[in-house]
Structures are given as C-alpha cells and as structure tokens.
Amino acid sequence: MFHYLLGRLWQSLVLLVIVSMIGFAVLNLAPGGPLSQYALTPGMTQEALNRLAEQMGLNRPLPVQYADWLWHLVQGDWGRSYRDNQPVLDVIGRHLFATLLLMGTSTLISILVGTWIGIKGAVKRYSVFDYAATVGAMVALSIPTFWFGLVAIYVFSLWLKWLPAGNMYTIGDGSFGDYAIHLIMPSLVLAFVNVAVWGRYMRTATLDVINQDFVRTARAKGLPERTVMMKHVVGNALLPMITLAGVQLPSILGGALVTETVFTWPGMGRLFLDSLGYNDYPVVMGLLMFSAMLVLAGNLIADLLVAFVDPRIRLG
C-alpha cells in the first residue's frame, strides 16, 4: 500500500509540473501579455513600460521567469495580484469557501439522486421509469449549463418569485436560512448534468453486478430481495463509482465556473473570468494551480479508496 501511494504521489507531482509549464507558457505567450492593462493607463509611455517590465522581471527569458515563479511557489509565495497588489493566496482564500460550498452541495445532490435513479432503473429495467430516466439523462446532457441557469432564473426568480436570482447572500442578512435559499438554484443547476452521468453509470454498474453468480446464489439461499440488493449488489456496484467521483471533479469545476458567472456567485470560477479580463496573470496562474491540485487530490483520494476496498489493485 505504501509503494502504491508513493507511486501515485510521484505521478501527481509530475503531472502538476507539466500543467504549470503549459499554463505559464500559454498565458505569457498570449497576445497582449501581462503588461497590457498597464499600457492602457493614460500617459503611459513605452519607456515606462520597459522600466515596469524590468522591475517585474518580465524582460527575462520565459524559462527563467518560470523557474523563478516555480521556486517562489514552492516556498509558499504565489505572487501578488496586478489588480490590487494583494497576495494571490489571500485573493483565492476570499473566494474559496463559496466555491467549496457550491461544489460540495451539488456533488452531494448528484451522488444521492443519481445513485437512486441508477439503482431503480437497473432493478426496473425497461420499465416506464427506466425509459423516462434515459430520456431525461439525454436531455440533461444536451442542455448547456448556462442556458439551464438562465431558464431557472427566469422561471423561479422573475416569474414565480420564489428564489433570489443571484449572489450568495442578501446584504445585511447573511443568516443560515439566507445562505440556504441563495444556494438552491446554483447547486441544482450545477448538479443537473452530473445527476444524469451518475445515474447512467450506476445503472450500468448495478446491471453488471446483478448478473453475477454470487447474486444468484444469495437469492437461491432465500435471502430477502432488499438484503440481496443492499448487501451484495449496491456495495459492489459502488466500487467503480468511487473512481468516477474523482474523474467527475474537473467537470464539476468547469460547471462551477459557468454557474458562478450566471448566478453572480462569488467563487473561484467567477474570480477566474474576472482575472482573465483584467489580465491578472498571477491570480490566473494561482487559480490554475489550485484547481489542478484539487483535481489531482480528488483522483488520488478516489484511487486510494478503491485500492483500500479492492486488495487486487494495491497488491497487483
């Protein structure tokens, strides 16, 4: 188990370095460059821009800039925002809770609802419920997240006036109930597509286990159907779903970016778009690295859970 963990950590570290190299190169070689916002300042001359580039170390070769940035990153210095000169980690920290709250809630909804739909669809195969779940999954996977979010705002905020159209809380309130009512629409919109994915995967995994010999043996022994399903079928069907949870993390992050923009949710996704528009490269790189770390950590935890549950993986 130790060697398996060490190998996965080494792979994650190498992948993280590759992601950082590609992200750093793409950002710094993009048209405009880090100094494009400063060039718009009234009275800014080329000489002043050159002095600014020298002060910020932007006139050095790109590999030297990357090595310097990576060295400071390892030491815990992620740079400072071009917009307000605040440390990047502080800027990300102010938006981290909002994103984790939204992602955590939507992921919990996706797992619970998707697992239930998948199991029921497998047990009642080719029933009206199974066909309805299949059609619903296809529709959910076909609708863009931003369009579904806009429709939800129109129906539940403008027409029915049941829920707030955006933001994380009402200014001057900030109570638990206020947070909860603002969280309903963004979390459901973000979970919409992931419920479909979880439902289809869970249905396939459950059908695969139901046809195994040990399930037939359990039924032949006279065990109640509920016991067979909960103890023998669901437990084994959930094993590949642990891996899916780690694989789904990038899509949840991508969906959070769109959802946060539609609902003006003050999370890292909205911060990423705002920072791109301002060419705030230190914050963009910080968000890129933080997201990559989060995705790799999610996949690593999922792999470790699978290895812990299934000895064939950690001993193979």
Image (tube, rainbow, N blue to C red):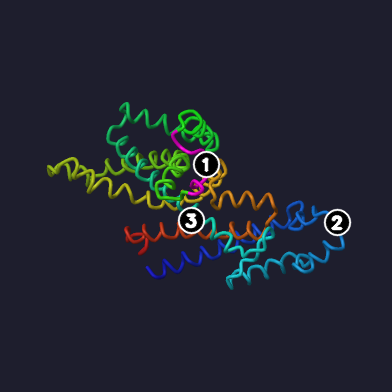
Label the magenta part by its dominant secondary structure: loop
Secondary element at tag 2: loop
Q: CA distance from mark 3 to mark 2?
A: 40 Å
Q: Does the magenta-highlighted stretch encompass residue 166?
A: yes
Question: Which quadrant of the rendered structure holds the N terminus?
Answer: bottom left
- 17 shown above or below 174: below
Residue 166 marker: 1
CB contact under 8 Å: marks 3 and 2: no
- Specify whether 194 is left or right of 30: left
Q: Nearer the viewer, residue 157 or 38?
A: 157
Residue 97 marker: 3
Name the kind of residue labelled 1 in the image.
Answer: Gly
Q: CA distance from mark 1 to mark 3?
A: 17 Å
Secondary element at tag 1: loop
Q: Nearer the viewer, residue 306 or 280?
A: 280
Residue 287 marker: none
- 229 shown above or below 292: above
Q: Nearer the viewer, residue 255 or 174?
A: 174
Mark 3 vs mark 2, foreground winner is 2
Callout 2 crowding tier (Cα within 10 Å): few <14, some 14–19, many ≥20: few
Secondary element at tag 3: helix
Q: Earlier in the sequence, mark 2 or mark 1?
A: 2
Callout 3 crowding tier (Cα within 10 Å): few <14, some 14–19, many ≥20: some
Q: Does the magenta-highlighted stretch encompass residue 241?
A: no
- 316 shown above or below 260: below
Q: Position of residue 131 (x, y in %)?
A: 36, 28
Q: Position of residue 276 (x, y in %)?
A: 66, 51
Q: Which residue is identified by label 2?
A: 43
Name the kind of residue labelled 3 in the image.
Answer: Phe
Magenta region: 162-172
Q: Quadrant of residue 72?
A: bottom right
